């Protein structure tokens, strides 16, 4: 039976003091045994701090991005191998904020996904339509195009990847996709995955976009929603714990 995955994306938030409090509370409050996997994607400077805090616990460490390059003269970049050295298990790839503010294209996303897999990281590939795309009736085409860029991987199988559906209009806006809207897109993604994987049902499809303690249970009850990628609500231990509880 596939375990759900609840991943917190802290984005550019945190401090040594705040991280210490938050991660200690999460580690202490994790159900044991946990019926779901849990990870936190922290800003890169805090990887070592959080690695030490989660040591020996089931809380997994994630990065928010990974370089498309292996190593070398790429100022400011962080390689997949470096992330591995800090015990990182998952790396977000192609988050809409990277696509929107840092010019990441489907091609970058595909290369980063390969880099992550080659280094033994599990990429969490983010896809999602903008409000304009949804209003124009292009939701399905937008997410299918984004997923298509990673569906055929050299030497790896798409089943090694986690996919996160994050409608851009739902991110940080308090406007969550309804469980039916989210399920509809997840079913489209699942069908697309079926073309590339013999076991498409084994691939975890997360929903992200204003997931919170109040709406998590309904979203997670949908047949094709296998977890959550949580922004704002992952910064508050109690809220994140309630989402984890909803995934048990
Ligand atoms: P919010 O939960 O703050 O809407 O952010 C979602 C997200 O972008 C997670 O990656």
Image (cartoon, grey):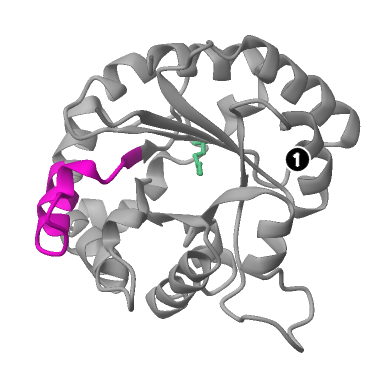
User: Can you give x and y, in whole percent of width and height, for residue 203 in the image?
Assistant: 26, 46
Relative to 196, residue 201 above or below: above
Circle 1 SS class: helix
User: Can you give x and y, in whole percent of width and height, for residue 163 in the image?
Assistant: 34, 50
Which quarter of the figure is the N terminus placed in? top left
Residue that carries the numbered disc 1 in the rendered image: 51
Relative to 113, residue 108 above or below: below
Relative to 78, residue 63 above or below: above
Relative to 43, residue 109 above or below: below
Q: Is residue 137 visible?
A: no
Q: Where, by quadrant of the figure, is residue 157 drawn?
A: bottom left
Q: Where, by quadrant of the figure, is residue 130 drawn?
A: bottom left
Q: Where, by quadrant of the figure, is residue 228 drawn?
A: top left
User: Can you give x and y, in whole percent of width and height, for residue 144 in the image?
Assistant: 20, 62
Q: Is residue 73 magenta?
A: no
Q: Is residue 204 magenta?
A: yes
Near mark 1 (Cα within 10 A), the count class, few <14, some 14-19 or many ≥20, is some
Q: Nearer the viewer, residue 21 or 81?
A: 81
User: In the image, what residue occupies the spot 62% across and 80% down?
Assistant: 70
**How many numbered discs sit on the rendered protein?**
1
User: In the image, what residue occupies the spot 38% across and 46% down?
Assistant: 166
User: Can you give x and y, in whole percent of width and height, for residue 155 in the image?
Assistant: 33, 75
Would the CB of label 1 be found within 8 Å of ligand 1? Answer: no
Quick one: which residue is furthest to the front in this view? 56
Range of residues picked out in magenta: 187-206
Q: Nearer the viewer, residue 201 or 127?
A: 201
């Amino acid at each position: 039976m596939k375990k759900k995955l609840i991943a917190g994306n802290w984005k550019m938030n945190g401090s040594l003091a705040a991280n210490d409090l938050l991660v200690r509370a999460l580690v202490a409050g994790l159900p044991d045994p946990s019926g779901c996997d849990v990870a936190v994607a922290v800003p890169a400077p805090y990887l070592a701090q959080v690695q030490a805090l989660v040591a020996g616990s089931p809380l997994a460490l994630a990065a928010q991005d990974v370089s498309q390059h292996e190593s070398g003269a790429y100022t400011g970049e962080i390689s997949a191998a470096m992330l591995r050295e800090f015990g990182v298990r998952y790396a977000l790839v192609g988050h809409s904020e990277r696509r929107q503010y840092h010019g990441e294209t489907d091609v970058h996303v595909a290369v980063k996904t390969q880099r992550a897999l080659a280094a033994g990281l599990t990429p969490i590939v983010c896809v999602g339509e903008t409000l304009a795309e949804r209003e124009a009736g292009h939701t399905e085409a937008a997410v299918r195009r984004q997923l298509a860029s990673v569906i055929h991987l050299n030497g790896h199988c798409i089943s090694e990847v986690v996919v996160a559906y994050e409608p851009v209009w739902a991110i940080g806006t308090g406007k969550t996709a309804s469980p039916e809207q989210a399920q509809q897109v997840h079913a489209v993604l699942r069908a697309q995955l079926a073309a590339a994987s013999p076991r498409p049902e084994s691939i975890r499809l997360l929903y992200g976009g204003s997931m919170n303690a109040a709406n998590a249970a309904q979203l997670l009850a949908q047949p094709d929603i296998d977890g959550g990628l949580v922004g704002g609500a992952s910064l508050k231990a109690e809220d994140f714990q309630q989402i984890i509880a909803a995934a048990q």
